[in-house]
Amino acid sequence: MQPHPTLDQFQVFVAVVEKGSFSAASRALNRTQSVISYTIANLEAQLGVALFGRSGTKRPQLTEAGRSVLEDARRLLGDLDLMRARVKALNEGLEGELPIAISSAVPSDIVVAVLRAFRNLYPTVSVNVTVGTLGIVMDAVITGRATVGFGGSMATGNHQIVSERIGHSAMIPVAAPDHPLGMLGRTISLADVRDETQLVVYDASGLTKGRDFNVFSLKTWRVSDNATKHQFSRP
């Protein structure tokens, strides 16, 4: 049974291709040309294919099989470099994964921009994002499913949470244009809305059970997320 090809053999193979010759690869890797040739011959024997044509040209020419193997070899070496970078980051105290919880009320364009910036600063750190409403963010942090959460304060006074204000957003009640409230043509009062059906997102975490936020109507429909609420409110 033939031994498996090694990452070192693939590194030599890629070096020959990228440097353009066996001699240039030997200089780049600080090895003799005979060692480079021997390594490539062994790799070809183990794979059972010819990686370079033997046409007598000065520059090694990849065969069709060689071009296919080159793509896989580069991917393997890239994965190895990524693993080394992750291990180095771990040794320096950087987490391998950052679980975060984000309220669906946080503007999505801001979330995307921040996560892109995070990826550029910490490319080796995986991000696990939980998105929810109301108590979902707080619950994820309390239970350890998230290291940090971004959402609105619910003034629960939970001693397990350390909060810091980083911005604000406003919630504006809306109605479809063809809804009776949308056709009043004047400023809407609380008396106007109390008998209309209000769509309310309920807290799936249960942390705010029995509490309502910004509920003005005596009649409500409760849904699990803002996307469903939006669909129900459209004309």
Image (cartoon, helix red, strand yellow):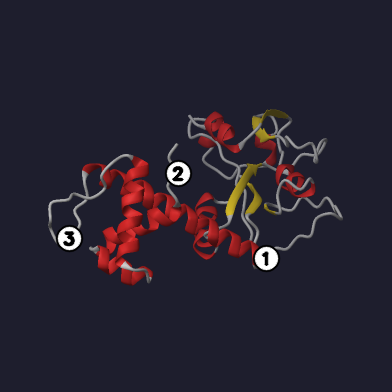
Classify 10 Å Cα crowding around label 2: few (below 14), some (14-19), many (20 and above): few
Residue at 35%, 56% (x, y): give it: 39
Residue at 67%, 36% (x, y): give it: 201
Residue at 79%, 45% (x, y): give it: 143
For the residues marked 3 and 2, what is the alpha-carbon distance in whole angstroms?
A: 27 Å
Which is more N-terminal, label 1 or label 2?
A: 2
Disc number lying in front (1 or 3): 3
Per the image, label 2 sits on a secondary structure element best described as: loop
Q: Amino acid at mark 2?
A: His
Q: Amino acid at mark 3?
A: Arg
Counting from the top left corner in percent of width and height, residue 173 is at: 60, 42
Residue that mark 3 sits on: 59
Which label belongs to residue 175? none
Residue that mark 1 sits on: 93
- Asked if residue 129 shows in the view, the reply is yes
Residue that mark 2 sits on: 4
Residue at 47%, 52% (x, y): give it: 79
Q: Quadrant of the N terminus?
A: top left
Q: Amino acid at mark 1?
A: Gly
Between 103 and 68, which is closer to the camera in this rendering?
68
Per the image, label 1 sits on a secondary structure element best described as: loop
Counting from the top left corner in percent of width and height, residue 155 is at: 80, 52
31, above or below 42, in the image: below
Q: Quadrant of residue 96?
A: bottom right
Which is more N-terminal, label 3 or label 1?
A: 3
Counting from the top left corner in percent of width and height, residue 232 is at: 55, 29
Which is more N-terminal, label 2 or label 3?
A: 2
Q: Quadrant of residue 184?
A: top right
